[in-house]
Amino acid sequence: MKTLRTAMLAVAVVAFLVMPAFAAGGEPVHALVAEINRARTDPAGYARHLRQFRTKFRGTLFRLPESDSYMRTQEGVRAVDEAIRALLRQRPLPPLAWSDGLAVAAQELVDEQGETGRTGHEIGSRFELRRRVERHGAWSGEIGEAIYYGPREPRLVVMQLLIDDGVRGRGHRKALLNPAFRQAGAACGPHPRYGDSCTVDFAAMFRDTD
């Protein structure tokens, strides 16, 4: 039986830093999934990155790495502290295997939103998660998606998804740490409103057909 589960509405952050584009399936997006795997396989150890990140806050603003620019958050350090506690409670999980088909499905959304400036998971359109994934393979169990808008350095992306500032239910954190997921693919690209965006698509079981 298939179960469709998607993370909650994408992280909408205001970015002031533009970084080079990442190609689908290229080294940078593989690095993003590798960074997710660091959090999955050693969540307690990964909490130290969030503790360091916490020191960059000034009220609800935090300073971007190696930059004089700031990003505004809704919750400030409260959400960071909650994420640290969650990681310390989290048991280690198996790493995600890379999927080219899921990466292409993620790239479709990144490309479409790069042209239109839209955000979110496009529920009810030809760009919704299930339709995109099924164009590139067959899945079973669960599928999910996490979307991030802002500077796309892999560690910053993963920390923001784990913190899930302003997202009720912390759906992105749940997606990254979902024990049912075994495969993932990612894509990043420019976004007209937020500078850049990254999408990660997950599946319990997925067979590429591309």
Image (tube, rainbow, N blue to C red):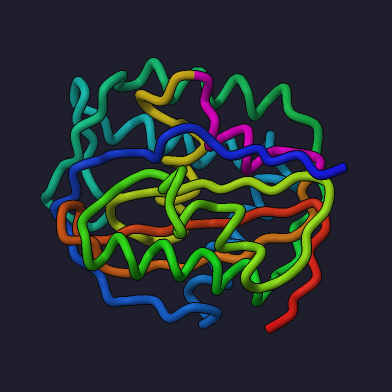
Asked if 127 appears above or below 58 in the picture, the reply is below
Q: Measured along the vertical axis of the image, is residue 48 above or below residue 100? A: above
In the picture, the quarter occupied by the N terminus is top right
For residue 133, above or below residue 14: below
Query: x%, y% of residue 55?
Result: 33, 31
Look at the image and give the residue range highlighted in magenta: 169-180
Q: 194 or 162: nearer the eye?
A: 194
Which residue lies at the image location 30% right of the left edge and 22% below the top edge? 76
* In magenta segment, residue 67: no
Q: Position of residue 16 (x, y in %)?
A: 13, 53
Q: Is residue 115 left or right of residue 86?
A: left
Say whether residue 63 is left or right of residue 22.
left
Q: Is residue 172 magenta?
A: yes
Give the residue drawn at x 27%, y 76%.
20
* Location of the C terminus (image quadrant): bottom right
With respect to residue 14, does 206 lie above or below?
below
- Number of numbered markers: 0
Q: Position of residue 90 (x, y in %)?
A: 74, 28
Q: Residue at x 55, y 74 (%)?
A: 104
Position of residue 5 in the picture relative to residue 164 (left or right): right
